Amino acid sequence: MNISRNKNTLAIIGLIILMGLTGCNGTQQEKHNSSTQIIETAPTDEITTSSIATPIPPSIEQITLYKYITEEKWTEAKKYTSDITSHNVADLELLKSYIEIRIEFADLSNSNDELKLYEPILAKINKLKLEDYSGEFKDQTTKFVEVFQKERNDYYNSLAEINEALKVKENKKLELVTWNKIENAINQGDFNTVISETVMLKDTNKDFSALYNFAESVVSGQDGDDDMMFYYLNEIPIDYNGKFSDVILEQKLQMKNKEEWKEDYLNQKKYKSVKSTSEKEAESTLPSPSIGMTADEVINSKWGTPKDVNKTITEYRVSEQWVYSNYRYIYLEDGIVTAIQY
């Protein structure tokens, strides 16, 4: 009986010890699992936090200045930039220069001066290199440069037209004086004076052309050069009926009849036409003018030497407008082509 009780007691004690050991192992396993989870998740949390970049908000100075520029309030923008001490404004120095350029351009555009100097502003634009700028106002600055260049080109074109009109007016005055000199020279047999008085206008006036060729033929005949004498006389159509046509016709009919002069005139024109065609073929191998060419390269291009040159000299550079026929223009800065208009 006592032995049986003792066995039961021992069994109970053993069961309690076993349960205690099992509980300890479970707690240690939970602690181990918990520790493992912390080790695994902690680095993940750290990476996620560090990968989030906090944007830097624009400064009050930048917001205000950008607003002035967007609204094209250049006077306010210039005054505001003088008060800015913060460096927290993107492209601040470039924008200061750009604002100055816009103010100068507005003053020049609104000026009533007959002579306008666009070249100092152009020099500042080139120095600023706005073509390389890629900031907030890229579109605005690009558009501005286009507007500036158009106004500058239009101004030079208007100058060219004014100069052309003045030349026509001066030529008319010149003609009145010249005709008196020509008439006196012919009456006195002074054909060298006739040549000097007609040579500048022979390509624009048929009367000057006829008298130039007539005078050259007389001088050639006096020098004993019969070939050139006939050549110059043959340049005058037999049916010419302008100034001094009676004197010219009388001289021609002393050498040949009208039919012979007509035939020689047509043959001479045909020869010159063939020669001109060959010259044009040679010209076709020449390059067309292009941006970046030097002045010499332009002269040796298809366009050749200009009819007129308008030059502007400033302390920064030399700007030129080369004028060609049919309203064609080439613009050069310090001898380099920067624009072509046709």
Image: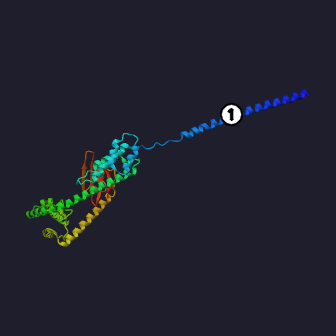
Quadrant occupied by the C terminus: bottom left
Residue 3 visible (yes or no): yes
The amino acid beneath tag 1 is Lys
Report the label total.
1
In the displayed structure image, the side of residue 234 where residue 286 appears, left or right: right
Q: Classify 10 Å Cα crowding around label 1: few (below 14), some (14-19), many (20 and above).
A: few
Q: Residue at x 37, y 49 (%)?
A: 69
Query: In the figure, 69 relative to 256: above or below?
Result: above
Figure quadrant of residue 114: bottom left
Query: In the figure, 224 relative to 253: above or below?
Result: above
Where residue 256 sits: x, y (%)?
17, 70
Quadrant occupied by the N terminus: top right
In the displayed structure image, the side of residue 193 where residue 317 appears, left or right: right
Figure quadrant of residue 225: bottom left
Where residue 299 sits: x, y (%)?
28, 53
Residue toward you, 105 or 19: 19
Residue toward you, 21 or 329: 21
Residue that extends furthest to the right in the rendered view of this protein: 1
Figure quadrant of residue 209: bottom left
Circle 1: element type: helix
Instruction: Give the colour scheme of this rendering.
Output: rainbow
Q: Which residue is mark 1?
A: 31
Query: In the figure, 20 relative to 266: above or below?
Result: above
Residue toward you, 163 or 40: 40
Where residue 123 sits: x, y (%)?
30, 47
In the displayed structure image, the side of residue 141 where residue 275 appears, left or right: left
Residue 126 visible (yes or no): no
Q: Residue at x 68, y 33 (%)?
A: 31
